[in-house]
């Protein structure tokens, strides 16, 4: 479905080049590209609302790196098979990147230890590609979760949040659009004030089965916590990662499409390649000890 | 090894931050990144216990003589210890989690932590109480030079912060502090920042802040918070306390700003966050601040106001503005309340501020000013008396709102109005922000005042009770000739 949507977008966008989608259609039996519905992971029962800082957190701010039609999780080793993604974090992401291959790579994040990769579908307005400004990654315990139980992501953990095949609005507990630092998400594009940038927020699952870095379909190794607890099937409590992608857009926006389709197909991916020692330090100091180790309020460098 | 082992045992209950059985070097690696020690005077034998390796048990942990890295020494230190750092350039981002230790450089201008634009904070003190950092430089960090968070009792003395990506010297959600005899330049946000605390019980004194987006910023901070005897110059804007629901503990309140020299904050070539562009050209600007006392400052050469009390417009608000009866509530209580996200933007007016006995000159829009965006100005309770000035907005401000008298709608509150709403338009043509990594700065000072007897003075951890400031003794500082 990914490719069909991307191709549709390409047609709509006219001359905008969305490179190669022929991959999976030319090889319909290819096992790559299979992506299960996000529904199997459940959804958060609540979100952190209000000002930042109600629970411990650490934050990485990662400038936009580049765009490419690659997806190391869903289309590993198949450059051009994916719709166009915007990448943040590691600068070295290619179609066959793994957590290990990205470890220690150069990064756009504001600390060198975060060489993970974050990506989201490219955004177009009236057919014109809009490069995002940055992605802000907030790491904290999910609402109601005992932070002292949280363990760091293993290197190479692959996570996808949101459903790129969605045909209608997704749960705003998982995906939503916001203005600036507001924590109020909407499934429709909001009208942001002139000096308040549009952001896309995606909240990732925070429970892991403790065994698999990835699985066929890319979903079932993870689950969202429910009312502060991880299910028995996914007993390992992870930080809840929320990624906010900031765009140089505000006001009323017409004609916005994602490389994956309509705005309600929003999603994001995370491939963990943090320096493991530093990640452990951050989880220990900021989440298990419940300290606000950093703030990013959605305001921008002028 | 003794001290490291002791620390490791203490930490074992909460997780494995240090490799207890390992070497100093290993313990450093577990909590800091990209550590590289300067040239050492003696290479430690990493196999031998530290105590047999020339580390004397005298409460002074020397870097690099006894420990390869600052992080290793900090991890090994116990309450009351002094980590003493020798001259050198240290590529470390140091985490501090031990209460009541003192970390000091032997020479402020030659003990340099350098983040190389890759490391995030020079020092990050994470919920450790009583930590004092003294007499050194932190430069080229992507976030902050010196950062305390969640701490009770903190002190930064004789520090230099240079070209850091957020703040120079930063205390967040921390109380009982002193920032003093320090210098900060080249940050897009504030050179000095104390935020999210009430009561803060803190003093900023004898600091110089220049070529930043903001000289001082304090969002939602106040309560026995004093900014005194300091210099704020050549920033986009000088001293800018503000309210906002993007962080906790609003509104900003009860800060005393006294005896400061504030001039020429119109600097067009600094790095700058968006708010710094909006506030550009103001000396002391309360943006939705409440209950502040601004007195005996000398403020001159600004394109807009010398001292301005203006509203802060928050388009993306995350909670309602608390009613006045909640303003005495300590941060520890107010932060627990559930937010109510408003449907529209918030306008945080500046309320109940006292502006008196300042000396102002050549502030081109107005030496003193009060403004709102729709609220009747006489209802805000701000007062102005005894200021040496030649212009104001509204025109007869001191007559309209003298301190000690009830304000009324009588008089001309309209003529000369600041029309502050226009700033939202003018910001579009402000000189654009410059990347902090490449912004033009003056030559980095190499002769800033050192802490007296830095190599020999005993360790004095930070007190949670700030020094008492004699406000009566504060005088308007002289202008720079």
Image: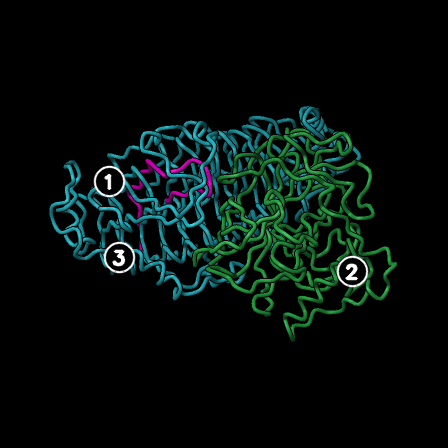
The colour scheme is by chain
Q: Is residue B129 above or below residue B429?
A: above
Residue at mark 3 to residue at mark 1: CA–CA distance: 21 Å
Marks 3/2 same chain:
no
**In-front residue for pair B374/B183:** B374
Q: Residues within 10 Å of mark 1 (few under 14, many from 20)?
A: many
Q: Position of residue A237 (x, y in %)?
A: 71, 33
Residue A150 image-quadrant placement: top right
Q: Helix or strand or loop: what does disc 3 sit on?
A: loop
**In-front residue for pair A245/B86:** A245
* Mark 1, residue position: B354
**Visible in this render: residue B90?**
no
Chain of residue at mark 2: A
The image's mark for residue B295 is none
Residue at mark 1 to residue at mark 2: CA–CA distance: 62 Å
Left or right, B362 with respect to B249, comes to left
> Which one of the lettered chains is coloured green?
A
Could you tell me which residue is drawn at 69 percent across and 66 percent down? A8
Q: Main secondary structure of the magenta part?
A: loop
Q: Is residue A193 above or below residue B456?
A: below
Left or right, A189 with respect to A139, comes to left
Compare marks 3 and 1 and give the one earlier in the sequence.
1
Tell me the shade of chain B.
Answer: cyan
Q: Which residues are magenta?
A: B242-263
Q: Residue furthest right?
A: A29
**In-front residue for pair A292/B50:** A292
Closest to the camera, between mark 3 and mark 1, is: 3
* Mark 3, residue position: B419
Q: Is residue B339 above or below residue B297?
A: above
Residue A93 image-quadrant placement: bottom right
Q: Position of residue B404 (x, y in %)?
A: 16, 36
């Amino acid at each position: 479905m990914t490719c069909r949507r991307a191709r549709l977008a390409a047609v709509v966008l006219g001359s905008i080049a969305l490179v190669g989608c022929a991959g999976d259609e030319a090889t319909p039996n290819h096992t790559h590209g299979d992506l299960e519905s996000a529904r199997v992971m459940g959804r958060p029962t609540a979100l952190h609302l209000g000002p930042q800082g109600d629970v411990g957190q650490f934050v990485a701010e990662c400038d936009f790196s580049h765009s490419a039609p690659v997806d190391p999780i869903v289309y590993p080793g198949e450059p051009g098979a994916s719709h166009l993604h915007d990448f943040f974090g590691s600068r070295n992401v290619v179609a066959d990147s793994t957590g290990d291959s990205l470890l220690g790579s150069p990064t756009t994040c504001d600390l060198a230890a975060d060489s993970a990769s974050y990506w989201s579908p490219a955004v177009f307005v009236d057919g014109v590609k809009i490069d995002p400004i940055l992605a802000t990654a907030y790491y904290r315990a999910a609402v109601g979760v005992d932070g002292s139980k949280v363990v760091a992501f293993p290197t190479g953990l692959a996570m996808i949040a949101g459903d790129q095949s969605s045909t209608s609005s997704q749960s705003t507990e998982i995906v939503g659009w916001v203005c600036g630092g507001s924590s109020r998400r909407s499934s429709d594009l909001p009208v942001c004030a002139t000096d308040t940038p549009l952001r896309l927020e995606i909240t990732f699952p925070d429970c892991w089965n403790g065994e698999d870095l990835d699985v066929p379909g890319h979903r079932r190794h993870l689950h969202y916590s429910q009312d502060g607890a991880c299910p028995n099937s996914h007993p390992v409590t992870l930080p809840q990662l929320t990624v906010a992608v900031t765009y140089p857009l505000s006001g009323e926006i017409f004609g916005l499409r994602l490389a994956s389709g309509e705005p309600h197909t929003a999603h994001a991916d995370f491939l963990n390649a943090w320096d493991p020692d530093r990640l452990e330090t951050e989880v220990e100091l900021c989440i298990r000890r419940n300290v606000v180790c950093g703030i990013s309020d959605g305001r921008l460098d002028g | 090894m003794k001290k490291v082992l002791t620390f490791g045992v203490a930490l074992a209950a909460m997780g494995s931050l240090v490799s207890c059985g390992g070497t100093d070097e290993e313990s450093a690696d577990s909590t800091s990144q990209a550590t590289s020690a300067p040239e050492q005077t003696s290479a430690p034998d990493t196999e031998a216990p530290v105590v047999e390796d020339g580390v004397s048990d005298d409460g002074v942990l020397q870097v690099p003589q006894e420990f390869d890295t600052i992080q290793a020494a900090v991890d090994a230190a116990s309450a009351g210890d002094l980590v003493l750092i020798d001259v050198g350039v240290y590529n470390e981002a140091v985490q501090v989690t031990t209460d009541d230790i003192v970390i000091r450089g032997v020479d402020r201008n030659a003990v340099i932590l350098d983040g190389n634009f890759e490391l995030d904070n020079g020092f990050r003190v994470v919920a450790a109480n009583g930590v004092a950092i003294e007499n050194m430089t932190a430069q080229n960090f992507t976030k902050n030079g010196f950062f305390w968070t969640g701490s009770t009792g903190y002190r930064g003395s004789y520090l230099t912060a240079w070209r850091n990506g957020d703040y120079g010297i930063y205390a967040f959600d921390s109380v009982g502090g002193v920032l003093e005899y320090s210098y900060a330049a080249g940050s897009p946000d504030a050179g000095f920042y104390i935020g999210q605390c009430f009561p803060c019980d803190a003093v900023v004194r004898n600091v110089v802040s220049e070529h930043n987006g903001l000289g001082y910023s304090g969002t939602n901070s106040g309560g026995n918070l004093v900014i005194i005897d300091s210099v704020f110059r050549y920033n986009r804007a000088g001293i800018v306390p503000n309210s906002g629901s993007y962080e906790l503990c609003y509104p900003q309140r009860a800060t005393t700003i006294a005896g400061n020299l504030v001039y020429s904050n119109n600097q067009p070539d600094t790095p700058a966050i968006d708010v710094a562009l909006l506030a550009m050209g103001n000396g002391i600007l309360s943006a939705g601040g409440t209950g502040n006392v601004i007195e005996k400052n000398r403020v001159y050469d600004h394109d807009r106001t010398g001292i301005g009390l203006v509203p802060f417009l928050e388009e993306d608000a995350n909670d309602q503005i608390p009613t006045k009866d909640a303003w005495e509530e300590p941060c520890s209580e107010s932060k627990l309340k559930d937010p109510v996200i408003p449907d529209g933007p918030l306008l945080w007016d500046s309320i109940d501020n006292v502006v008196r006995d300042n000396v102002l000159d050549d502030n081109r829009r107005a030496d003193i000013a009060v403004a709102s965006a729709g609220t009747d100005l006489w209802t805000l309770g701000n007062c102005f008396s005894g200021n040496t000035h030649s212009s104001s907005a509204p025109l007869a401000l001191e007559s309209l709102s003298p301190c000690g008298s009830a304000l009324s709608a009588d008089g001309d509150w309209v003529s000369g109005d600041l029309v502050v709403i226009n700033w939202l338009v003018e910001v579009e043509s402000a000189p654009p922000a410059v990347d902090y990594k490449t912004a033009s700065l003056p030559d980095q000072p190499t002769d800033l005042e050192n802490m007296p007897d830095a190599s020999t003075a005993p360790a004095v951890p930070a007190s949670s009770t700030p020094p008492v400031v004699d406000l009566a003794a504060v005088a308007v500082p002289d202008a720079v000739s």
